[in-house]
Amino acid sequence: QVQLVESGGGLVQPGGSLRLSCAASGITFSIYGMAWYRQAPGKRRELIATLTTDGNTNYADSVKGRFAISRDNAKNTVYLQMNSLKPEDTAAYYCNIKRWVGVTLTNYWGQGTQVTVSS
């Protein structure tokens, strides 16, 4: 059974930092691509960062230069380092792992962790 367990969310002041973690079990972690999404109240879920199996990263313009996605295959964990946080970063954050085999997508989600940026 595949499980993704997120941690690291919380309340932080503007300008502060947080590191989210997403620990996976039940899968061969290293063959999956990684991503982080977020969803603010009343808004659509937004893709903010991706990390491929060969180490390529991509970021939404809204977080570029402030957030960094990384992975530790030995720990089956993907991270999202968030710096210079702004109130508009307030959202529920979700990790996602996925793998395409031909036209078949295998896709798993974490349960979400809340990040609130407020003074």
Image: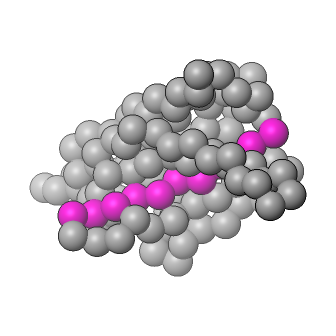
- Asked if one can make out residue 52 in the rendered structure from this viewpoint, the answer is no
**Residue 115 placement (x, y as % from top left):** 29, 48
- Dominant SS type (magenta): strand
Residue at x 79% of width, y 35% of height? 30
Give left or right: position of 25 versus 44: right
Range shown magenta: 31-41
Quadrant of the rendered image containing residue 15:
bottom left
Q: Could you tell me which quadrant the C terminus lies in? A: bottom left
Q: Could you tell me which quadrant the N terminus lies in? A: top right
Magenta-drawn stretch contains 90? no
**Residue 18 placement (x, y as % from top left):** 39, 43
Quadrant of the rendered image containing residue 7:
top left
Give left or right: position of 33 versus 78: right
Give left or right: position of 86 versus 108: left
- Asked if one can make out residue 57 in the rendered structure from this viewpoint, the answer is yes
Magenta-drawn stretch contains 37? yes
Quadrant of the rendered image containing residue 73:
top right
Q: Residue furthest front?
A: 104
**Residue 23 placement (x, y as % from top left):** 55, 28
**Residue 16 placement (x, y as % from top left):** 33, 51
Residue at x 68% of width, y 46% of height? 106
Is residue 66 depicted above or below 22 in this figure?
Answer: below
Residue in the foreground of this view, choosing between 5 and 105: 105
Is residue 20 depicted above or below 23 in this figure?
Answer: below
Residue at x 81% of width, y 39% of height? 31
